[in-house]
Amino acid sequence: MIKVKLNGHDYRYELFQIISLFYNKNEIEFTDEYKCSFESTADLNELFVEFKIYEDDILTINEKVNITYDKKNIKNAIKITALRALKRYTGSNIPWGILVGIRPTKIVHECFKENLNNEEILNYLISNYELSFEKANLVLEVAKNESKFLTYNEKNISLYIDVPFCPTRCIYCSFTSTPVFGNEFLINGYIEAIQREIRETLRFLTAKGFNIDRIYIGGGTPTALSPYNLDKMFNELSNHIDLLRVKEITVEAGRPDSIDEEKLKVIKEYGCSRISINPQTMNDDTLKRIGRNHTSKDVIEKYILARNLGFNNINMDVIIGLLGETKKDVENTMKKIKTLSPESITIHTMAVKRASVLNERGYKNKNIETDDMYSIASDSCRSIGMYPYYMYRQKNMVSPLENVGYCKKDMECVYNIQMIAENISIAGIGPGAITKLLYIDENRIERVANVKDIREYISRIDEMIDKKIKALDTLF
Ligand code: SF4
């Protein structure tokens, strides 16, 4: 057990986040006892913060920095001293420094407002957050690429629709995803509820003069629904807004085993402009291991089918750090995806989430090759002229990396950019969907969540709608 002692401050959570970059969370314990492994001190009289590491009661490492009375400065110093000491002690490389749970590009956009130049921004990221030069450059590049999409119009709002069904459940999945097979009755109830929620939400928004900017249909796997049910959902949308005038409609077709010609035709007819066909890996053994009921050949077939039906904006997701994968596997995946030439590729680093089967099985993957595999995937995207256009970081990744969307010129998914940058309000529809309300003058976001459980969502649909509309009514 690693015993951590705090003196003169109570930034326990922040310190826990930093220490857990180096050690398993369940090994970390906070203590008031005299004896400890790590000791973090904030001295507000002498104005310094230090982090000490003891080995058999002998002081081995001491990292100390001076502080001001500023709360933010003290908190940063507490994290930085811990990070520096633990990097020296363990020899680990933490490229994202103390940036945990913060959207990295938001910091750069603040720097843009202060008119800092490139060099000043890189210095700021490196000295204040201990980012590696490479990651600081990546954040700056993404922030520059996305900035042209971050204009704000209070009358614009986007829609997110959650479809919580999938063909089968992948073992790393932490979403509310229910297998379609055997749940037909539940799906019928869901469709009725979602039609109702779409109807009431859009009636309200259009009456209030909102413009539906972009629509993202995710989950789950929306194409796990039958063509008939997809038609019902889209038809409800089209009863209230002109879908052909919506700037971008993405459907996460996701799993190839959920896609067929009829479904693609339905969504295309209603104006879907972008789909995702997500292989995650093009290695059949891995696909079996992660519980996906399809092969890499299915991915290729469904991709060609979509192309032939006229889909000219296709994204493909890959995951780095999947069970048992090596650099060779990632090379193979990227080679095959490059041959298909999608408009965008999103590289995810695998995260072991609490609600996943993997976590239940106690899976702890500290794959030393993950960083290299990640570089293979991103270099591969750049080699076909793609550039990074949005990014986010998650907790519990198998390696402290990032998720980045790469795209060909002008093929950005703007919904993704705006959702991560939180510069537009989003009305969430469906079980577990979150409505995000942006109060730009107050630099504040409020969240209103629907219940996750599908049965509860169906039985409490009126309450969900009511709560959301009241919240949306506070926007302007
Ligand atoms: S396809 Fe996605 S949502 Fe569905 S089970 Fe797999 S990880 Fe979960």
Image (tube, grey):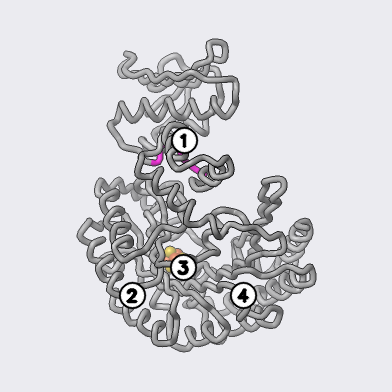
Query: Which quadrant of the structure image shows residue 276?
Result: bottom left
Residue 456 in sight here: no
**Observer-nearest of 420 and 86:** 420
Please give the residue where the numbered disc 4 appears in the rendered image.
246
| Local SS, label 2 | loop
Find residue 124 and name its label.
Answer: 1
Q: Is residue 449 above or below residue 305?
A: above
Q: Return the x and y of residue 440 as percentages of the image width and height.
A: 69, 50
Q: Which quadrant holds the N terminus? A: top left
Cα gap from disc 1 to disc 2, whole angstroms: 46 Å
- The residue at the point 32 percent across, 60 percent down is 382
Task: Give the x, y percent position of residue 60.
Answer: 31, 17
From the viewer's side, name the closer residue of 137 and 436.
137
Residue at 75% from the left image edge and 57% from the top image edge: 475
**Pair 4/3: label in front:** 3
Q: Secondary structure at mark 1?
A: helix
What residue is pinned by disc 2? Answer: 294
Q: Amino acid at mark 2?
A: His
Label for residue 410? 3
Q: Nearer the viewer, mark 4 or mark 1?
A: 1
Instruction: Say what amino acid the circle numbered 4 marks.
Output: Val
Residue at the spot 74% in from the left edge and 60% down from the top edge: 472
Determine the quadrant in which ligand 1 lies. bottom left
Q: Residues within 10 Å of mark 2 (few under 14, many from 20)?
A: some
